[in-house]
Image (spheres, rainbow, N blue to C red):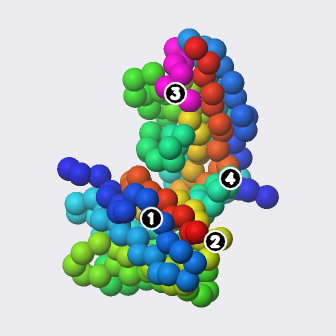
Amino acid sequence: KNEVEQSPQNLTAQEGEFITINCSYSVGISALHWLQQHPGGGIVSLFMLSSGKKKHGRLIATINIQEKHSSLHITASHPRDSAVYICVGGSQGNLIFGKGTKLSVKP
Amino acid sequence: NAGVMQNPRHLVRRRGQEARLRCSPMKGHSHVYWYRQLPEEGLKFMVYLQKENIIDESGMPKERFSAEFPKEGPSILRIQQVVRGDSAAYFCASSPGTGAPDEQYFGPGTRLTVT
């Protein structure tokens, strides 16, 4: 059983929609990362957070340490947001990867 | 400040050849991590190195794979006598080694194809 669970596994949205990807973890972590993997395979680190909320452009990430839950939100989604979004729990230098959410935004 | 650099970005090797993958960490970072992503699978940890030391190699296959991070120069992931099952994307990440140990920055990856 993976200790970092993401939902949904696949998500299709229309351009302009508000998107939420969820991540739950069952282990104690000191930081949580959200990564974006483009169709070509490259990985971009979107956020690293240990509490509260961070915002970068149309992307917002939140984390609730007590509930062991994080969400990634995309406002006004665009086809170029189509990618796999990976939630990663960090603890003592070890990273535990979720299986990813494949997002497809249709024009 | 340049990010984590990996080269080559694409590498094609025939079965039995050796593959060498390089990772240059971000400036000031002394810790390097290697991850492998097999086709249709998630990222899996392979090895964690500091300069001249292997800290954790619990994710490395027992044979044919080795990693080093010398005092000078990039970290090298070496795969000897490659087989088709080694075809994957190999990512490295670096961290400063001080402050938050989980603050890892990812490189763009090397896509290895074994023919």
Q: Are labels 2 and 4 assigned to the same chain?
A: yes
Residue type highlighted by circle 2: Arg
Badge 4: how crowded within 10 Å, few (<14), some, or many (20+)?
Answer: few
Taking A64 as reference, is A28 above or below it? below
Q: Nearer the viewer, mark 4 or mark 1?
A: 1
Mark 4–mark 3 Cα distance, whole angstroms, equals 20 Å
Quadrant of res A10: top right
Q: CA distance from mark 2 to mark 4?
A: 15 Å
Q: Identify the residue under disc 3.
A: A81
Magenta-colored span: A75-82
Mark 1 sits on what residue? B11
Q: Does residue A81 belong to the magenta stretch?
A: yes
Does A62 sit above or below residue A87?
above
Q: Mark 2 — on which chain does it sit?
A: B
Which residue is painted at 58% across and 69% down in the image?
B115
- Report the front residue among B13 and A87: B13
Magenta highlight: main SS: loop
**Residue bearing mark 2:** B84
Nearest to the observer: residue B98 or residue B41: B41
Whether residues under marks 4 and 1 lie with C-beta atoms below 8 angstroms apart, the answer is no
Amino acid beneath label 4: Glu
Residue A100 among those drawn in magenta: no
- Mark 1: few, some, or many residues within 10 Å (few <14, many ≥20)? some
Chain ID of residue with mark 3? A
Give me the residue at 44% from left, 44% from top: A44
* Residue pointed to by mark 4: B40
Tag 1: residue type? Leu
- Spatial separation of the CA atoms under disc 2 and disc 3: 32 Å
Quick one: label 4 or label 1, which is nearer the N terminus? 1
Mark 3, other Cα within 10 Å: few <14 / some 14–19 / many ≥20: some
